[in-house]
Amino acid sequence: MAQMIHARKTENGEFRFRLWSTVTDSYISEEMTETEVREWTLKEAVCAVIEQHCHDIDNRIQRTREKGTSSLMGDTRDLNAPWDGTRKKRTRT
């Protein structure tokens, strides 16, 4: 979502903020403190990540059902084969 943060100073010198949408060319929030802006934008960011995850996981599961793996590298796995062996854990050096 394309948004800008607008600010103004109040009579007592405190800052107030509003979010402006470049999509609707209008404010999408009421006047907020800096803390409220941070909370608002954090919530929007979390929601966007969750939405993207839901989209991605659907695609990954569908790809796995078709190819036996979610790999985008062109790999395939036999859907009727046993599970692959356990990989060795990498050790840090």
Image (cartoon, helix red, strand yellow):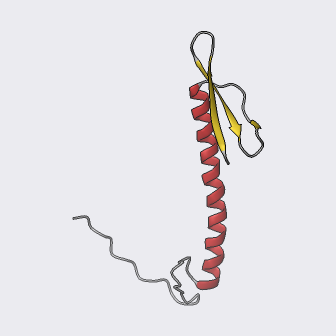
Query: Percent position (x, y) of residue 9?
Result: 60, 18
Is residue 61 placed above or below 36 in the rendered structure?
A: below
Residue 76: quadrant of the picture: bottom right
Picture coordinates of residue 54 (x, y %)? 65, 61
Residue 36 relative to residue 28: left or right:
left
Residue 93, located in which quarter of the rendered image? bottom left
1 lies above or below 37: below
Q: Is residue 92 left or right of residue 84?
A: left
Q: Is residue 80 left or right of residue 22?
A: left
Which residue sits at x=57%, y=83%? 68
Image coordinates for residue 52, horizontal then vertical, percent: 63, 58
Q: Residue furthest left?
A: 93
Placement of 74 over or under 8, stated as above or below: below
Q: Residue at x 53, y 78 (%)?
A: 71
Q: Residue at x 60, y 46 (%)?
A: 45
The residue closer to the viewer here, 49 or 82, is 49
* Quadrant in the rendering for residue 26: top right
| Residue with the most extreme top position | 12
Residue 58, position as x, y percentages in the image: 66, 68
Of residue 75 and residue 80, the one placed in the foreground of this image is 75
Residue sitting at x 60%, y 78%: 64
